[in-house]
Amino acid sequence: MEEKTKKNLKTAAAATGIVLGTTFLVMRHIAKKQQPQATYANQPEEQNPMEGKKVVFVENENEPANADGRCGHLEAVGESEHLPTFYEKYIKRGFDVVLSFGGLVVLSPIYAATAIAIKKDDPGPVLFKQKRVGTDKSYFQLLKFRSMSVNTPKDVPTHMLKDGGITKVGAVIRKTSIDELPQLWNIFCGNMSVIGPRPALWNQDYLTAERDKYGANDVKPGLTGLAQISGRDELEIEEKAKLDGVYAKALKSSSLAGFLMDIKMFLGSISATLHSKGIVEGGTGAIAREISKAGIPDHALFDAGVDDYGFKKVFSIDKDKPLRILITGADSYIGTSFEAWAAEHYPNLEIDTVDMIDGSWREKDFSGYDVVFHVAGLAHADVGHVDDATKQKYYAVNTDLAIETAEKAKKDGVKQFVFMSSIIIYGDSAGYGESKRITATTVPSPANFYGDSKWQADKGIRKLASEDFNVAVLRPPMIYGRGSKGNYPTLAKLAKKLPVFPNIDNARSMLHIDNLTEFLCQIMLSGSGGIFFPQNAEYTKTSDMVRMISHVVESNITETKALNPFVVIGSKVPGKVSDLVHKAFGSLTIDQALSNYDGIDYRVNGLKESIEKTENDFA
């Protein structure tokens, strides 16, 4: 009997070995076949032009901000000269293959159960792919289990999401780090290691450059690393890069040092996971610390809605999804422009408009709409020459009417309410010779009743947000385009009539109407709530804009600094003269980091293209 048992055990062991061996060979074949696609080998346009090069980050506030919230770009300064050690090339890779294969086999029931749970909880893809930075800055596709609802933000810490974007299953797999398990396949394929610096997003240029200072980009990225178990999201980018460099230095110094460091990291990661810390990525630590250093009271941050800023989120958008949208406010510039843009580019959006003037809108049933887009309001007035009755009218329309409309939308079961707030809630722009920038730590502080009427509505509407009622608030800068009113038409007239114009250094955030309407379409299709700061990708210098307008209309205006002394004198003259100078040559910008949204590509026109289009439309 004992001999028979031994024989059966040997047979079972042999069978298991054959099955595992066959499984391994099949998986290796699949991995090899998928590798070109996973590394963009057949897509030259998707490959990193900085692959294999040493880089530095060049700051330039006139360039769009990257995923780290820094404006600038990478420049190559040399070639990477790292040669992997024997441990790194053979032993570490051997461990990676064995551990990843074993994990894929042993955890296969968890993979299957997680996939079924994700599908059942929120129908859609089980996995998603992200372009990440691999060894020597090559790109590869990183895999994760989807933890976010299809049409709401994903890949951000739970505390940054008020509106339940994380699914029930997603909350569990994030807390336990199960969402990271598909990366075992990345490891098995050879694009990652079990231990190593977390792979950066392809557009985290600043992090990439910081890591290059310490040689951290030379080594293979990992499932977990020293930075993740040392401080997680509380660490700033510079600190994370230094820790990644500590690991890379140990790995490259000798095989023994690399082996001991990997053992330390492996045990530390297990401890972090068991204590429910998870593996956390992201660049919000710097912003959190900036807020802390600024000493801003908690109640002020709560009022401003800092935790719900849209740049902290990731969006998933189905551009073909049908939506019914109700614009509350007839004949507005933004409303009619949005309707026209959607009709041309998003025929799946069905849009109606209701007039808010006579009060009959209160009898309209909102329940048949997915989105209510509120644009009704009184525009900027000469705030210095109005009586109390006029001021009360602004509050009645800009504040009370807006909140009442949102309350009705929520009561009628509308899922998303989109409200046009304004940059004006942050006060006036800086005067001539000064600068003002709105950042993540800037608290709204209206300078007049008009700004305050918008600010009170901004706060009041956001208080209505709930799991079933998402509120999206837009705080845009000056909007311009075909048919616009305000400062742009005035500048255009000057560009067409004046032979010369002062060359003053200033900077303003602006938003072309096409960029706004494209953003509106995408944020509505996402169904998400939050606070958003859409703006053009570049800041605008007044004299540059006048010159561009002049070029389009062929008036050939000349910029000259010879007129600048007159501007200086004009800025000192009390009354309308100085007001005009400050309005034309003052500076007011929004930090570009607040205006870049992962998953939303809304800037369809650059500054030059927007002016060309605007002037051709005006003509």
Image (cartoon, helix red, strand yellow):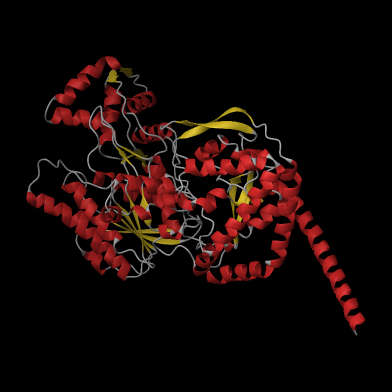
288 versus 492 height, above or below: below
- The part of the image, by quadrant, that contains residue 176 is bottom right
Name the residue nearer the viewer: 79 or 526: 79
Is residue 55 shown left or right of residue 344? right
Q: Residue furthest bottom?
A: 1
Say which of 261 and 425 sits in front.
261
Can you give x and y, in whole percent of width and height, for residue 77 in the image? 58, 27
In x, y percent, where is residue 2?
A: 89, 82
For the N terminus, give its image quadrant. bottom right
In the image, farthest residue toward the top: 562
- Regarding residue 39, the answer to whether it shows in the image is no
User: In which quadrant will I find the C terminus?
Assistant: top left
Residue in the foreground of this view, choosing between 177 and 312 = 177
> Is residue 211 something that shows in the picture?
yes
Residue 19 image point, x, y percent? 82, 67
Residue located 88% across and 74% down the image: 11
Q: In the image, what residue occupies the spot 18% across and 43% down?
A: 447
**In this rendering, position of residue 292 left or right of residue 179:** left
Residue 292 relative to residue 55: left or right: left
Image coords of residue 439 (percent x, y) = 34, 43
**Residue 435 occupies quadrant:** top left
Q: How many marks?
A: 0
Residue 506 vertical position relative to residue 514 in the rendered view, above or below: above
